[in-house]
Image (spheres, grey):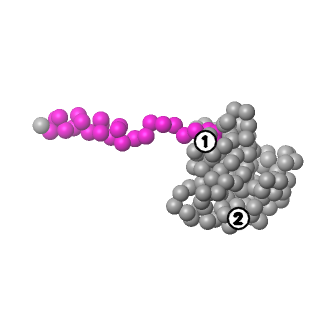
Amino acid sequence: MLKSTISLFPLIQSRALSLSAPLSHIIKLTRLKVIDNSPLGQEGMEYHRAPRCIHVYNKKGIGTIGDQVLVTIKGQKQKAIIVGCKHKRQRCMVPRFDTNNIVLINDDGSPLGTRITAPIPSFLRGNGNYSKMIAIATRFV
């Protein structure tokens, strides 16, 4: 009888593990983390539901660092820029983050907050579209 319980133990352990790999991009319904100090972002992070991506503004519908997305926070729609993304493996010159980070922006592209609390990738500096976001960032990776 002891022998049969020992043989079932690895089977039970393998079912408890998640077999899906982390994605290296943002798609619809991905949970996100707001890293600026905007009032909507702070309330959304304390709210019982995490902000989620509902649309990616590019042809493929798959977002990576530097892409614009439409997110829902506390039932409100807001545009954002992806500044951090989880990766399965390290890509050349792209930092790896523990969470999927975003910065909330207005329709004209200016950030809602006045400070960014997490480091953002330094290769976003070369793009002129993000100059206002780069100006309020304090740390770069």
Q: Position of residue 3 (x, y in %)?
A: 16, 35
The residue located at (43%, 40%) in the rendering is 18
Question: Is residue 138 rendered to the left or right of residue 126?
Answer: left
Q: Position of residue 37 (x, y in %)?
A: 70, 65
- Can the viewer see residue 117? no
The amino acid beneath tag 2 is Ser
The residue located at (81%, 57%) in the rendering is 110
In this view, the residue in front, 93 or 137, is 137
Which circle, 1 or 2, is nearer the viewer?
1
In this view, the residue in front, 76 or 62, is 76
The segment highlighted magenta reads: 2-26
Determine the secondary structure under disc 2: loop
Q: Residue 38 shows which numbered tag?
A: 2
Question: Is residue 23 rendered to the left or right of residue 57?
Answer: left
Q: Residues within 10 Å of mark 1 (few under 14, many from 20)?
A: some
Against 86, residue 139 (above or below) is below
- Image quarter where the N terminus lies is top left
In this view, the residue in front, 104 or 5, is 104
Against 46, residue 53 (above or below) is above
Q: Residue 104 shows which numbered tag?
A: none
Determine the secondary structure under disc 1: loop
The amino acid beneath tag 1 is Lys
How many angstroms separate mark 1 from mark 2 (CA)? 23 Å
Q: Position of residue 81 (x, y in %)?
A: 73, 49
Q: Position of residue 12 (x, y in %)?
A: 29, 39
Against 72, residue 40 (above or below) is below
The residue located at (73%, 37%) in the rendering is 58
- Give the residue at mark 1: 28
Q: Residues within 10 Å of mark 2 (few under 14, many from 20)?
A: some
Mark sitting earlier along the chain (1/2) = 1
Inspect the magenta stretch and tell me whether residue 10 lies in it. yes
The residue located at (80%, 61%) in the rendering is 136
